Amino acid sequence: MTFAFECGAFDPHLMRSGTATLVWNTATGLAARGHTVSVVTPAHGHGGYLRERHGAEPTGFSDEFRMPLHLDPAVWPGFPPRADLHLRTTALRLRRDGVDLYFLSNAHLDLLERTFVPEAGTEGRDLAYFKEQVFQVAGVRFIRQALAHADLVQAYEPHQHYLLPAALAAAPGVPVVSTVATNVPINLKVHRPQLEALLTSLGAETDLDGYADPPEEPGALPEVLRRYLPSTLPDPPERPGHVACHSLAFEHAAAIDFLTVGQLDHCTTFANTPFEERFRRLTVSRVLRRTADQLFVGGCGISDGWLRREVPKGHRRDFLTGLGLDPALPTFYHAARYAPDHKGQSELFQALAQVLDEGLEANFLIRCARPTGAELPPALAELADKYPDRVRADSELVDEPTLFAHAAAADFCVFPSKFEMDTFLIAQGEAMAFGAVPIATEQAGTRHFGHAFDRHERPGATGFALPRSFRPDDDLLRDRLAERLREAAHLFRHDTDAYTRWSERARRTARGFTWAASARLREERFRGVLAGAAAPTGAETLIRRGWYDGLDDAAWAAHRELIAQSAAAQGRPEECLRACAGRPDLAAAAFDTAYRAARFRVCEALADEHPLDTGDFRRRLRAHERAGRAGATDRAGATDRAGATDRAGATDRAGVTDRTDVTDRTDVTDRTGATDRTDVAYRTDVAYRFPHAERVELFRPGADGPADGFGQLLRRDGDTFRGGFPGPLGDGPLVLLITLPRGRFVWDEVRPFPEH
């Protein structure tokens, strides 16, 4: 049986996200293998449409219940602390392609007919926010009363089914497989009194103490992480009295299902992201380690109907000509729901404007789907108006034939998704299946598509990679995207043979992902769950995820080299030292790996333990304080406090002003030579030198904003990045976020050299 908040991929009118495609194709794939499959999902207010359009029929099911609602006063000001919902649930049944679909309706499930899910900002203002919780409670009650004979429940999205594993284990005693379809924040939390009340109402009382995160650690880096990470989406703001719902779902699930190997690796490590440091300290990371043997990849695919389609002869020429575009030009295609941050559409529109303003001759087919009736995003509408002979844009929800007509006419498909929120990314695979060469972010979840940064290093590359991004408005992603568009257009015009090879590789790669193969994988694991069979995690997988505590002594001995390199790249000094013990050659190699990955804690540990030639990595951050008349220049005419050199202009070998010759802040003189102790401005200038960095951001704990040294982008000057903030340095360390090539991120907590 399937439990999903959305499953209407058989009708675009009933579809709001790619998860619907996953749910529907998995269900029909299992049904095609001879299994009895039922889907439980909300009607979302479309009961009349389901009856008229698809012949859905009432089941006669009726269930009246009271759902407890405990509201957090800090989040719901003006609402009573207790606001129970009195609901009556009914169900429609529709049989299609061998699957029985049950559409649940009640006063809450029929809300949000247009969007299905509560929109951002609903929490604290509108009780429609609890629609997903209502579905869980109503769904558990429906399963117990109408489908209690089910052998197994596959539930999609932990944040939409966290009650089910514990509740259905209690009654009727059916195992739940939790499928992680999208990468929503893994530490998403629920108000604990509300969660306890819901579990109690379902007869699934659970001790929630074990799901609380450990107390916040003191220190500069934890403080910066708490303040900065909510802007990057993976980690929502901390809320007292809330419990991580993914931990609850994972702990009680019989198995945990991911769509790709890359998605599984990402969700268990968050490697090379700004969230990695904090994730290791959270309870959900420990829950995932405890459930290591329950994790598996069920896969994803491209629909058989799509793969069976044939491109009519002359389709590309005729279709583009019919749109008023020139078929002689390379054609770029993007199709996704409108989500400007998640899908990288802000940077995409900026990059398109840049290359079109430069005169790039190319066609762009851009679809940013929005609920029916929504207009084009302003930036996209402006592009379409300004370049009517180059850009065709649409925001309508359309059927598969329309999507196919666009994708089959494309030479390249563009998917600059951000924040590692995509998983399989079906739309990219669909375009590639008909030869569109990808230009896409190198997210862990989508690396199966084979796009690469350097096609010469990877002869089997299918297309062009873009760096991962975790910034709301990322100039590095924008500029790299514009660069890739130029490069792709040049390849299409001037190296036809190379383009043809890439196109054919893209086609072959995408067509290897089928729902039949995915159904076989899930069927095998579901049978194992029902049989109680374990699937032990191999040593190399544990090492790749950094779960070294799962290795026995024999595995440590057999995999020393792999552990040393892995621990160095992951910033794990203790494990790296253990693996390198007695092996100076291994320590030297590990140091080089750690240095290139900006894992300086490992570098320091290795340098302290081994006689290595480590260069000058300890002196990477320099700072000097200077003082002068506020807003004025000093006697020698040096620049004012926005970025000055000292009187003598002496610099150290890193190109940073030497603080030993800076005017003493207790004896500042004005131009006339008179000492002035009443109008003195203090400033600290910093310079960070690391040759492998592409971007460096400065974070001074306690600062208010970028101008004050919190989240300040340092100016690049060769291998050195410069900035500063008003006032003295103080005694604590500074924190820096380093962007490495290919969109890898690492934090560095360091005191300036020489220390103050």
Image (tube, helix red, strand yellow):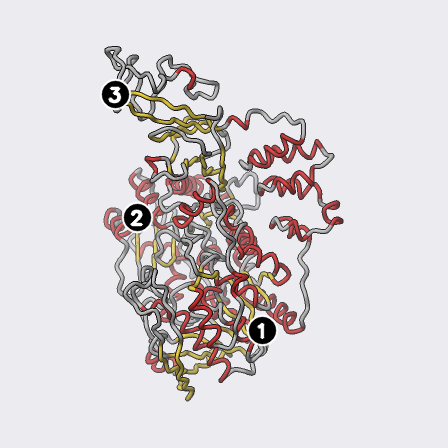
Amino acid type at image mark 3: Ala
- Report x, y in % for residue 262: 55, 53
Q: Residues within 10 Å of mark 3 (few under 14, many from 20)?
A: some
Question: Helix, strand or loop at disc 1?
Answer: loop
Q: Quadrant of residue 677?
A: top left
Q: CA distance from mark 3 to mark 2?
A: 51 Å
Q: Which is nearer the eye, 700 or 15?
A: 700
- Report x, y in % for residue 382: 25, 49
Q: Residue furthest bottom?
A: 60
User: Which residue, given by chain and number where applicable, does mark 1 sit on?
Assistant: 175
Q: CA distance from mark 2 to mark 1?
A: 53 Å
Q: Residue furthest top?
A: 673
Does residue 449 show up?
Answer: no
Tell whether label 2 touches label 3 (CB within 8 Å).
no
Would residue 80 be found to the left or right of residue 608 on screen?
left
Tell whether label 1 touches label 2 (CB within 8 Å).
no
Q: Quadrant of residue 103?
A: bottom left
Question: Helix, strand or loop at disc 2?
Answer: loop
Which tag is nearer the camera, tag 1 or tag 3? 3
Q: Earlier in the sequence, mark 2 or mark 1?
A: 1
Amino acid type at image mark 2: Arg
Q: Quadrant of residue 726?
A: top left
Q: Which is nearer the eye, 40 or 644?
A: 644
- Report x, y in % for residue 655: 44, 20
Amino acid type at image mark 1: Pro
User: Which residue, given by chain and number where applicable, does mark 3 sit on?
Assistant: 632
- Report x, y in % for residue 308: 49, 66
Name the residue at 26% across, 10% down: 673
Which tag is nearer the camera, tag 3 or tag 2? 3
User: Which residue, given by chain and number where applicable, does mark 2 sit on?
Assistant: 390
Q: CA distance from mark 1 to mark 3?
A: 72 Å
Q: Earlier in the sequence, mark 3 or mark 2?
A: 2
